[in-house]
Image: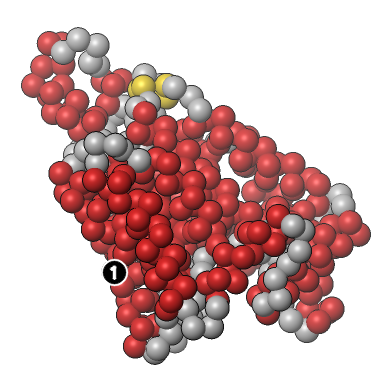
């Protein structure tokens, strides 16, 4: 429950009362303290020592002191908080698996989504669901949730998917999150199952969703968001304030990198260059350019190397003694794509940092929505020797870590 609440707090971006401190920070610290004993006993932690990631974090923190001492100390504190949560999360998640985690987190995400949509509807705002604390990450994660439901063999999932599919697609469309549009297009082929009613509903749902979105959109906002893709393909940009601001920020970040190609202007230094230029701190909305501007080629190399490390990891058929299932491979690949799209089209914040740190761990986390190892564990307790090919390694999530409690 604590990890699910932490995840929802991270996605929502809500601060503690009367402060600028994220609610996630409190959950992260409590989570790490509660999990400390388990982390010390676990051998899972050794998988966190990914060479390119450690080098990037070192560069990221070292260069944070270039703009100012206070900026460096702030980034050290932020990395410690997020890093502590990632260590605790990875260790705990490797025990409980996806099904149990999403059973709690999914309810929290749906509650957050319902709250955001309800707030906007009561305000008479039918599109651009971004005005309340900007918890837009929930829209980006909706396609992944639909995929997990589709790949799950649970009877409840087979009932929920046809019911949630049209609702979530319409809401995602009205949100105007173009990253979510891209992910829906990516996930849609994996939702097809010709023995399932939802497959035959999908073309109709998509058509109705687009029609509903355009009919509810009095300002033409959704249509402009959809047209962005065709305009980008033609090499042009839209004329919205948001797109103009992003275009300027991307051009400025590129120029900052060209002027400081080796080590950049220092972590978080890009914001200072923007403030000097226009008295407005515009984020580049692109982690690649942000890292390039802040940390130069030195940081960019290890940033990219960490992502490559994670991608190679999810292609592996085996992890230790555990064989990946087809469902696990598909979910891990889509999760990786989700993180990559978010990194490529979003500003720097705690969500991005957490997503980036989690990327190389995808090869070690159990991502099968059916969690077959639960059944293997119960059989092993009865008689491991009587089941062909079953051993302690079969239920190990990392090849050397064996969950022994809270199953």
Q: Badge 1: how crowded within 10 Å, few (<14), some, or many (20+)?
A: few
Count the marks.
1
Please identify the residue farthest to the left as the structure is shown.
Answer: 382
Asked if residue 70 can be seen in this view, the reply is: no
Q: Is residue 275 left or right of residue 144?
A: right
Instruction: Give the quadrant of residue 275.
Output: bottom right
Please identify the residue farthest to the right as the structure is shown.
Answer: 259
Instruction: Give the quadrant of residue 16.
Output: bottom left
Q: Is residue 165 above or below residue 248?
A: above
Residue 274 versus residue 139: which sits nearer the camera? 139
Q: Is residue 252 left or right of residue 128?
A: right
Q: Quadrant of the N terminus?
A: bottom left
Q: Where in the figure is residue 295, as x and y percent of width and height? A: 77, 54
Residue at 81%, 47% (x, y): give it.
Answer: 297
Residue 222 versus residue 257: which sits nearer the camera? 222
Q: Is residue 231 left or right of residue 192?
A: right
Residue 66 versus residue 36: which sits nearer the camera? 66
Q: Where in the figure is residue 394, as x and y percent of width and height? A: 28, 21
Residue 182 versus residue 142: which sits nearer the camera? 182
Asked if residue 264 can be seen in this view, the reply is: yes
Q: Considering the numbered disc 1 on the image, is that residue within a helix, a strand or a loop?
A: helix
Q: Where in the figure is residue 128, as x and y percent of width and height? A: 49, 76
Residue with the mark numbered 1: 111
């Amino acid at each position: 429950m604590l990890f699910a609440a932490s995840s929802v707090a991270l996605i929502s971006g809500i601060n503690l009362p009367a402060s600028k401190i994220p609610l996630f920070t409190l959950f992260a610290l409590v989570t790490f303290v509660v999990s400390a004993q388990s982390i010390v006993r676990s051998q899972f932690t050794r998988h966190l020592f990914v060479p390119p990631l450690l080098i990037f974090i070192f560069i990221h923190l070292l260069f944070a002191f270039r703009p100012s001492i206070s900026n460096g100390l702030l980034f050290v504190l932020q990395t410690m908080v997020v890093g502590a949560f990632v260590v605790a999360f990875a260790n705990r998640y490797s025990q409980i698996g996806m099904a149990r985690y999403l059973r709690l987190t999914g309810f929290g995400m749906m509650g957050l989504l319902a709250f955001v949509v309800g707030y906007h509807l009561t305000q008479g705002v039918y599109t651009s669901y971004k005005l309340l604390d900007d918890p837009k990450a929930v829209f980006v994660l909706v396609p992944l949730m639909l995929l997990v439901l589709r790949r799950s063999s649970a009877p409840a999932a087979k009932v929920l998917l046809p019911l949630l599919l049209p609702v979530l697609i319409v809401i995602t469309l009205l949100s105007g999150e173009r990253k979510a549009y891209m992910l829906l297009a990516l996930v849609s082929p994996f939702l097809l199952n010709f023995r399932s009613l939802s497959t035959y509903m999908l073309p109709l749902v998509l058509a109705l969703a687009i029609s509903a979105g355009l009919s509810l959109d009095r300002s033409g906002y959704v249509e402009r968001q959809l047209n962005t893709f065709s305009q980008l393909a033609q090499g042009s940009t839209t004329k919205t304030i948001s797109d103009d601001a992003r275009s300027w920020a991307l051009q400025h970040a590129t120029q900052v990198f060209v002027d400081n190609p080796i080590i950049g202007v220092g972590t978080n230094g890009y914001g200072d260059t923007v403030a000097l230029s226009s008295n407005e701190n515009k984020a580049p909305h692109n982690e690649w350019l942000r890292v390039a501007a802040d940390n130069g080629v030195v940081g960019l190399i290890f940033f990219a190397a960490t992502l490559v490390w994670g991608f190679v990891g999810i292609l592996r058929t085996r992890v230790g003694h555990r064989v990946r299932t087809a469902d696990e491979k598909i979910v891990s690949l889509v999760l990786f794509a989700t993180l990559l799209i978010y990194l490529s089209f979003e500003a720097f914040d705690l969500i991005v940092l957490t997503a980036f740190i989690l990327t190389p761990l995808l090869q070690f986390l159990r991502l099968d929505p059916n969690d077959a190892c639960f059944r293997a564990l119960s059989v092993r307790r009865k008689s491991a020797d009587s089941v062909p090919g079953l051993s302690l390694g079969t239920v190990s999530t990392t090849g050397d870590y064996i969950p022994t409690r809270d199953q």
